[in-house]
Amino acid sequence: MNIGGFAMTDVSIAVLSAADFEIARGMIPELSDHPSYEDWLDWRYGIFMGRSLGGENAELVTVRLAPFLDWCARRHMRPSESALDAFAAQSALHQRARSAA
């Protein structure tokens, strides 16, 4: 998207539920860097705000852990925060396509 000479980039920032976060801490190494779910959410919101203020069209996308892990397994990917964001982007794209139909 181009607004006033600035190109807007769509960016999806994944968030998990508190229950999924606790399970995922043992599977996604970056999550163990955060002492609590609230700390991790603050980190994710900070990324969202920074990207938004930087001119990107950012959105928070709630991701369910089980479908994400299946998605990673099918792609032979290690679960990570960047993989969470890639899954969130794909999920958001599919949701927009369904809404447009």
Image (tube, rainbow, N blue to C red):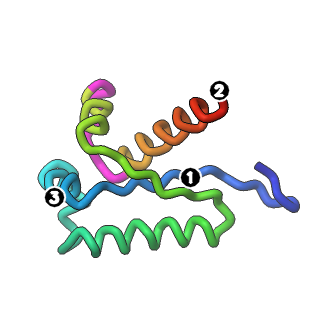
How far from the left and from the top, in percent, is residue 53? 63, 72
Kind of residue indicated by mark 3: Glu
Q: What is the secondary structure assignment of the residue under circle 2?
A: loop
Q: Which residue is mark 2?
A: 101
Identity, as a three-letter code, of the amino acid under mark 2: Ala
Q: Give the residues drawn in magenta, as a range.
A: 74-81
Q: Which residue is mark 1?
A: 11
Q: State if disc 2 and disc 1 touch (CB < 8 Å).
A: no
Quadrant assignment for the C terminus: top right
Which residue corresponds to the image point at 50% horizontal and 65% vertical from the top-left?
48
Q: Toward the viewer: 95 or 87?
A: 95
Q: Is residue 97 above or below residue 13?
A: above
- Left/right placement of residue 82 relative to residue 90 reads left
Amino acid type of the residue that numbered disc 1 sits on in the rendered structure: Val
Q: Position of residue 34 (x, y in %)?
A: 23, 71
Mark 3 highlights which residue?
A: 22
Q: Image height check: is 100 above or below 46?
A: above
- Tell which circle, 3 or 2, labels the residue nearer the N-terminal end: 3
**Magenta segment, principal secondary structure?**
loop
Position of residue 97 in the picture relative to residue 68 (left or right): right
Left or right side of 87 for 30: left
Marked residue nearer the N-terminal end (1 or 2): 1
Instruction: Determine whether the residue tagged by mark 1 lies in a helix, strand or loop.
Output: strand
Residue 84 appears at what percent x and percent y? 36, 47
C-alpha separation, residue under disc 1 versus residue under disc 2? 22 Å
Task: Residue at 37% x, 71% y: name it.
Answer: 43
